[in-house]
Each structure stands twice: as C-alpha cells, then as structure tokens.
Image (cartoon, rainbow, N blue to C red):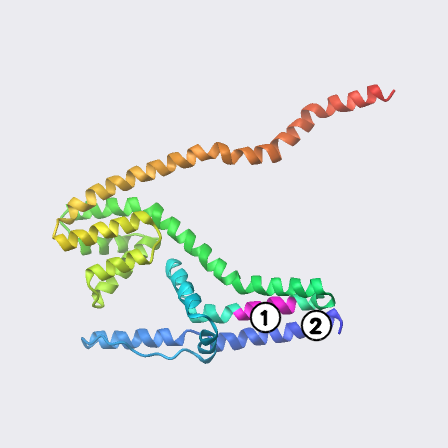
Amino acid sequence: MSTSVWLMIAAVVLPGAYFAWSLIAVDRATGKLIRTRLQTVGQGQLKDASSTPALMPRIIRRLTPTSYVLRLDQTLAKAGRPASMPLDRLLTVKPLAALGGGLLALVLGGSRSTVGLFLTLVLATACYFLPDLLVYNNGTKRQARIEKDLPNVLDQLLISVEAGLGFEAAVARVGASGSGPLADELVRTLQDIQAGRSRREAYRALADRSTVPDLRSFVGAVVQADIQGLAIARILKPQAEQMRVKRRLRAEEKAMKLPVAVIFPLILFIFPPLFIIILGPAVINAIATFSK
C-alpha cells in the first residue's frame, strides 16, 4: 500500500485509540477512594477502601514488572503526582506511545529494509520511555524549586514561631500564604496529620517525597526535636541560618561556574564572526595581491 493509504489508516485508527484510552484509563478509582475516605473520616472511622483499577491498567500492571511500577510511583511522587497523569494512566500511555511510534515509523517506510526495522524498534522503545523522561524532568524541576524556596520558608516559619504560633499553626500559615511545590508539600503534610497519621510519620513522608538533602535534614531535626521534647524555635533558628549560608554558597558557586560556561559559546559563536570581520578584508586583499 502507498504512503497516503497508511496515513489515512493512521488518521482513523489513532484518534479512535486515543478516545478509547481516555474512556478506559480515566482515574475514577482515585476519586471513589477519596470520597469513601472522606465519608469514613467524617464518621470518625478511617478505613482502607478497596478500589479496583480499570480493565486496561489492571492488565498492564500484570504485564509490567513490579519493581518498575514502584520506580514509576516514586518518580510521580517526586513530581508532585500531577492530577493529569496518575500512575495507571502513565502505565497505559507508555505502550500506546510505543505503538504509535512504531506505526509512524512503518508508515514512513520502516518495513522496507533491515535498517528501517531496526530504526522502527528504536523509535518504539524511545516512545515507550518518553513519558518516564517527561515525568522525571518535571520532578527534577520541582525539586529544584523546593531547594530554592526552602530558606525563605524556614525564615517564615521561624518568624511565625517566635511570634507565638505553634509549629503546626506556623506550617499551616506558611502553606496557605505561600505558593509553589514546597507550600503544597507542607499543606499535604498537615492533611496527613489531620487524617490520623502521627507527626513523625507525616514529616518522614514529606522527606521521602523529596530528594533535596536540606529538606531531609530539616525534617530529621524536627522529628528529633519532637522525640526529645525540645523547643522548636531552638531548632528552626540554626536551620534557617544554615540554609541562608548554603543559598549564598550556591549562588557563589554558580557565579564561579559562569566563565567556564561562557567559553564554549564564545569560541563557537562569537570568535568566528569576529575573526571574519577583522581578518576578512585583509585576507581578501592578500589574495588579490598575490593573484596578480
């Protein structure tokens, strides 16, 4: 069949596949679980509600290695668990993306030679792992934003605690007035405490959802203060000072790395036009002189 026929088939099959996926892979189970838990919390009984995933995610979960599913779940946790891409939907998107990439390569002539089949396989594999890369990239940016906002958040917590608020009240105030992933994580930690988790478990879960060493150190200090019964202001003040020093050191480190980063654009994009402008007329005159 010709390329136009393959394009017409793809134009019909791909939208139908996307529509079927949007119906099958929608995250109804999570919404049902949240509503059930809210009802049980309102009655004073927090129980685990069983939920059954949709058909396609359940089949894909059985076909996917458990260790790989757990790794994807951790990556989603570090990315903030975006509502548009829950775990079941991510597991469903991956084989569909691989299938779409393979079909596209075949339509473009991948079945005409052995090299084309190899490139088709490579493209299908790349499309399979592309959602992982996107989620990992979002998680990396989110963790960098948390590391950037942490010193300011600690300063706000210290001011609130020294003004007379309790630690949870200070966390609630900072989370409600702030914006960004760190404020969202603080709000989620308070929600975990309100749902029945102990303070230590909620704070440790906050550390587990992040890869920022400074945040892990802060959570460890707060948990240790809770165990030993220390005043939280005595813990927050050195932590805030330490974070400010680290922020200044990171800024100085980036400033020291800047000349090295500028060298390659300078050599590749600035020096050649400069040499052409300065030495170009002299070279042209020399060629014209020696050619006579």
Q: Amino acid at mark 2?
A: Trp
Q: State which region is magenta.
A: 95-104
Which structural element holds mark 2?
Answer: helix
Looking at the image, which residue is at 38% across and 37% down?
Answer: 251
User: Between 104 and 165, which is closer to the camera in this rendering?
Assistant: 104
| Residue 285 image point, x, y percent | 78, 21
| Residue 174 image point, x, y percent | 25, 52
Which structural element holds mark 1?
Answer: helix
Q: Amino acid at mark 1?
A: Leu
User: Between 176 and 85, which is closer to the camera in this rendering?
Assistant: 85
Mark 2 = which residue? 6
Mark 1 = which residue? 99
Q: Quadrant of the C terminus?
A: top right
Q: Is residue 143 left or right of residue 117?
A: left
| Residue 250 image point, x, y percent | 37, 38
Q: Quadrant of residue 82?
A: bottom left
| Residue 259 image point, x, y percent | 49, 32
